[in-house]
Image (cartoon, coloured by chain):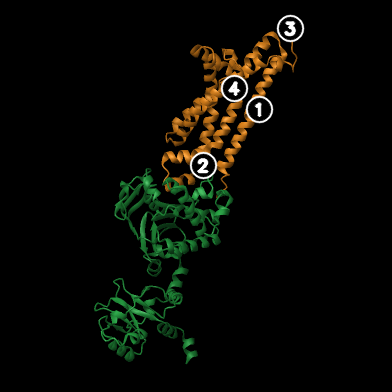
Amino acid sequence: MIQLEGINKTFDDGSEALKDINLHCNTGEITVLIGPSGCGKTTTMKLLNRLINQSEGKIYFDDKDITNMNPVELRRGIGYVIQHVGLFPHMTIEKNIGVVPRLLKWDDDRIKTRVNELLNMVGLDPDTYGQRYPSELSGGQQQRIGVIRALAAEPPIILMDEPFSALDPISREQLQDELIRLQKNIQKTIVFVTHDMDEALKIADQIVLMKDGVIVQQGTPEEILRHPADDFVKDFIGQKRLQQVQDIPTVGEVMNEKPVTIAPGRGLAEAMKVMENKRVDSLIVVDGNNTLEGYITVYDVTQAFDNEDQQVQDIMHTFRHTIHADMLLSNAIRMMNELKAPYLPVITEQHSLAGLITRGSIVGYMGDTYPSVRNGVV
Amino acid sequence: MNDYGYLSIFSARANDLLIALGEHMLITFASVMLGCLVAIPLGIFLTKTDIGWIRSITFTITNVFNTIPSLAMLAMLLPLLGIGLVPAIVALFLYSLMPILRNTYAGFTSIDPHIIESARGMGYSTTQLLFQIELLLAVPYIMSGIRLTTVYIINWAALATLIGAGGLGELIVSGLGVYDKPLILAAAILAMLLALVADFSLGKVEKFFFKSAHSTQQQN
């Protein structure tokens, strides 16, 4: 986890670049710093690899104060991608990717293997591209190399300074998709600077909106879209995007708030009875504090029914996926589709059950919202 | 009194010509080497320093050296260093400073600052950055400075004979004394050839470095 506490930065010419920045970036997430030019987003990022030093305040990586670390050592443990790519023109692609491993004195075989692995990861054939020079590649390919070069020595943290903004729209989209795909596997802590709201909404787990050296708002894309802190944020997001969000309901508006539940310590006969009464084929298991434990299906119960010693908790499955009430319904539907899940439990921050989103509840909501559908059915 | 013509002189006085050529090359090589040893580090220092006046003063001084006529330069060094090889090399060394210094400076300032930034951001130490990135990228510029200087120094070295440093100039001057036209011409031709060969071969080296070092910065 990256933590910034009470950061102030005054440049030598007396201009105040950052004022009392407090920020934390979660491990394995993409934190996007966004704002108009001159807002201090790049300055904030460069504090993290100490290309710029703060005037006041502390920065911690996993509770280690980085001001006590050797900046050169520190940087070798952090991936760095910049807008202008910054590939070394006098080195082949292979050499470029292997830069940090070489600085870290990996042996040649290991570097070679890693370089090939990385090139394959972004769909560039090592035999074709390894020996080329950067100037022989297209802009999109160069930045792919820029990105995998940052990944080469497997740093836990990666800093990306407007990496895609100089690319044409098609390459940009592709690289964003690739980044999302890569991130699913590599789970790095990424700090990403951009001025493009679409890009931020697409890739961010957390968005940090900055203006004039101050953090204006920090939250998930969802939170920022739903509850913009002030007019500046609203303007920055743009009316169109705000409206789009307001048209789509959240999970919370659609979910079944009183799903049929059972406690883990109950017997199987009792579970069967509940299912019969409520006419459902599965039950959500919650403990006395309403904390979500898992679920049982009628199939599990009939399978284990003969064993009188068994309780609900013995045959219970845990949920692999849960959602929060502020998720957009469209996202929830997509999730259900991808997971082929008949329902998804909605939980609160404290992991207690808030409701259940089922196919039935979605159809019910649509019936209420779209009269034409209702008339058609009736 | 001569027992050779314009062509046969090359065989008749081969020994004298070769010795003179060797001295000429030595003088040139020594002064250019010295020039590199001083001007390249100095040029790098000038790109790193934040103090503007050091930069302007250094450039002014080296410029002034180059404005002194070579004859006058040798005359001025005569009371200080006497005669022989040393004052000649010193004089020519002073001439070599400016082009190498300028080109080193230009080479370093021409490097895309984003390349430096990404190198620093990835954890190159200052020395590694200098030797593995900056110097390699600036080499084509530095090489062209060295090439330029070498050609000039070969020409000016002909005057070094006036303070007794030898070289091809000595044959020319002594040829003038006895009106030995073939000798004058032969020495002059050798000096020209030397300059052409140096220019050509250093040009090749420069091109090689330019290709490998830059593969031209076409990035945008």
Locate residue A72: give its quadrant: top left
Q: Amino acid at mark 1?
A: Leu
Mark 1 to mark 3 CA distance (whole Å): 32 Å
Locate residue A211: give its quadrant: bottom left
Q: Are marks 1 and 4 in contact (CB under 8 Å)?
A: no
Reading the chain from its start, which is encountered first: label 1 or label 4?
A: 4
Question: In the depicted view, which residue is nearer to us: A302 or A199?
Answer: A302
Q: Are marks 4 and 2 on the same chain?
A: yes
Circle 2 is placed at which residue position? Answer: B111
Relative to A198, does residue B125 appear above or below in the rendering? above
Which mark, by number, is residue B25?
A: 4
Give the colour of chain A: green
Q: Are marks 2 and 1 in contact (CB under 8 Å)?
A: no
Which mark, by number, is residue B196?
A: 1
Q: Position of residue A38 (x, y in %)?
A: 42, 52
Mark 4 to mark 2 CA distance (whole Å): 33 Å
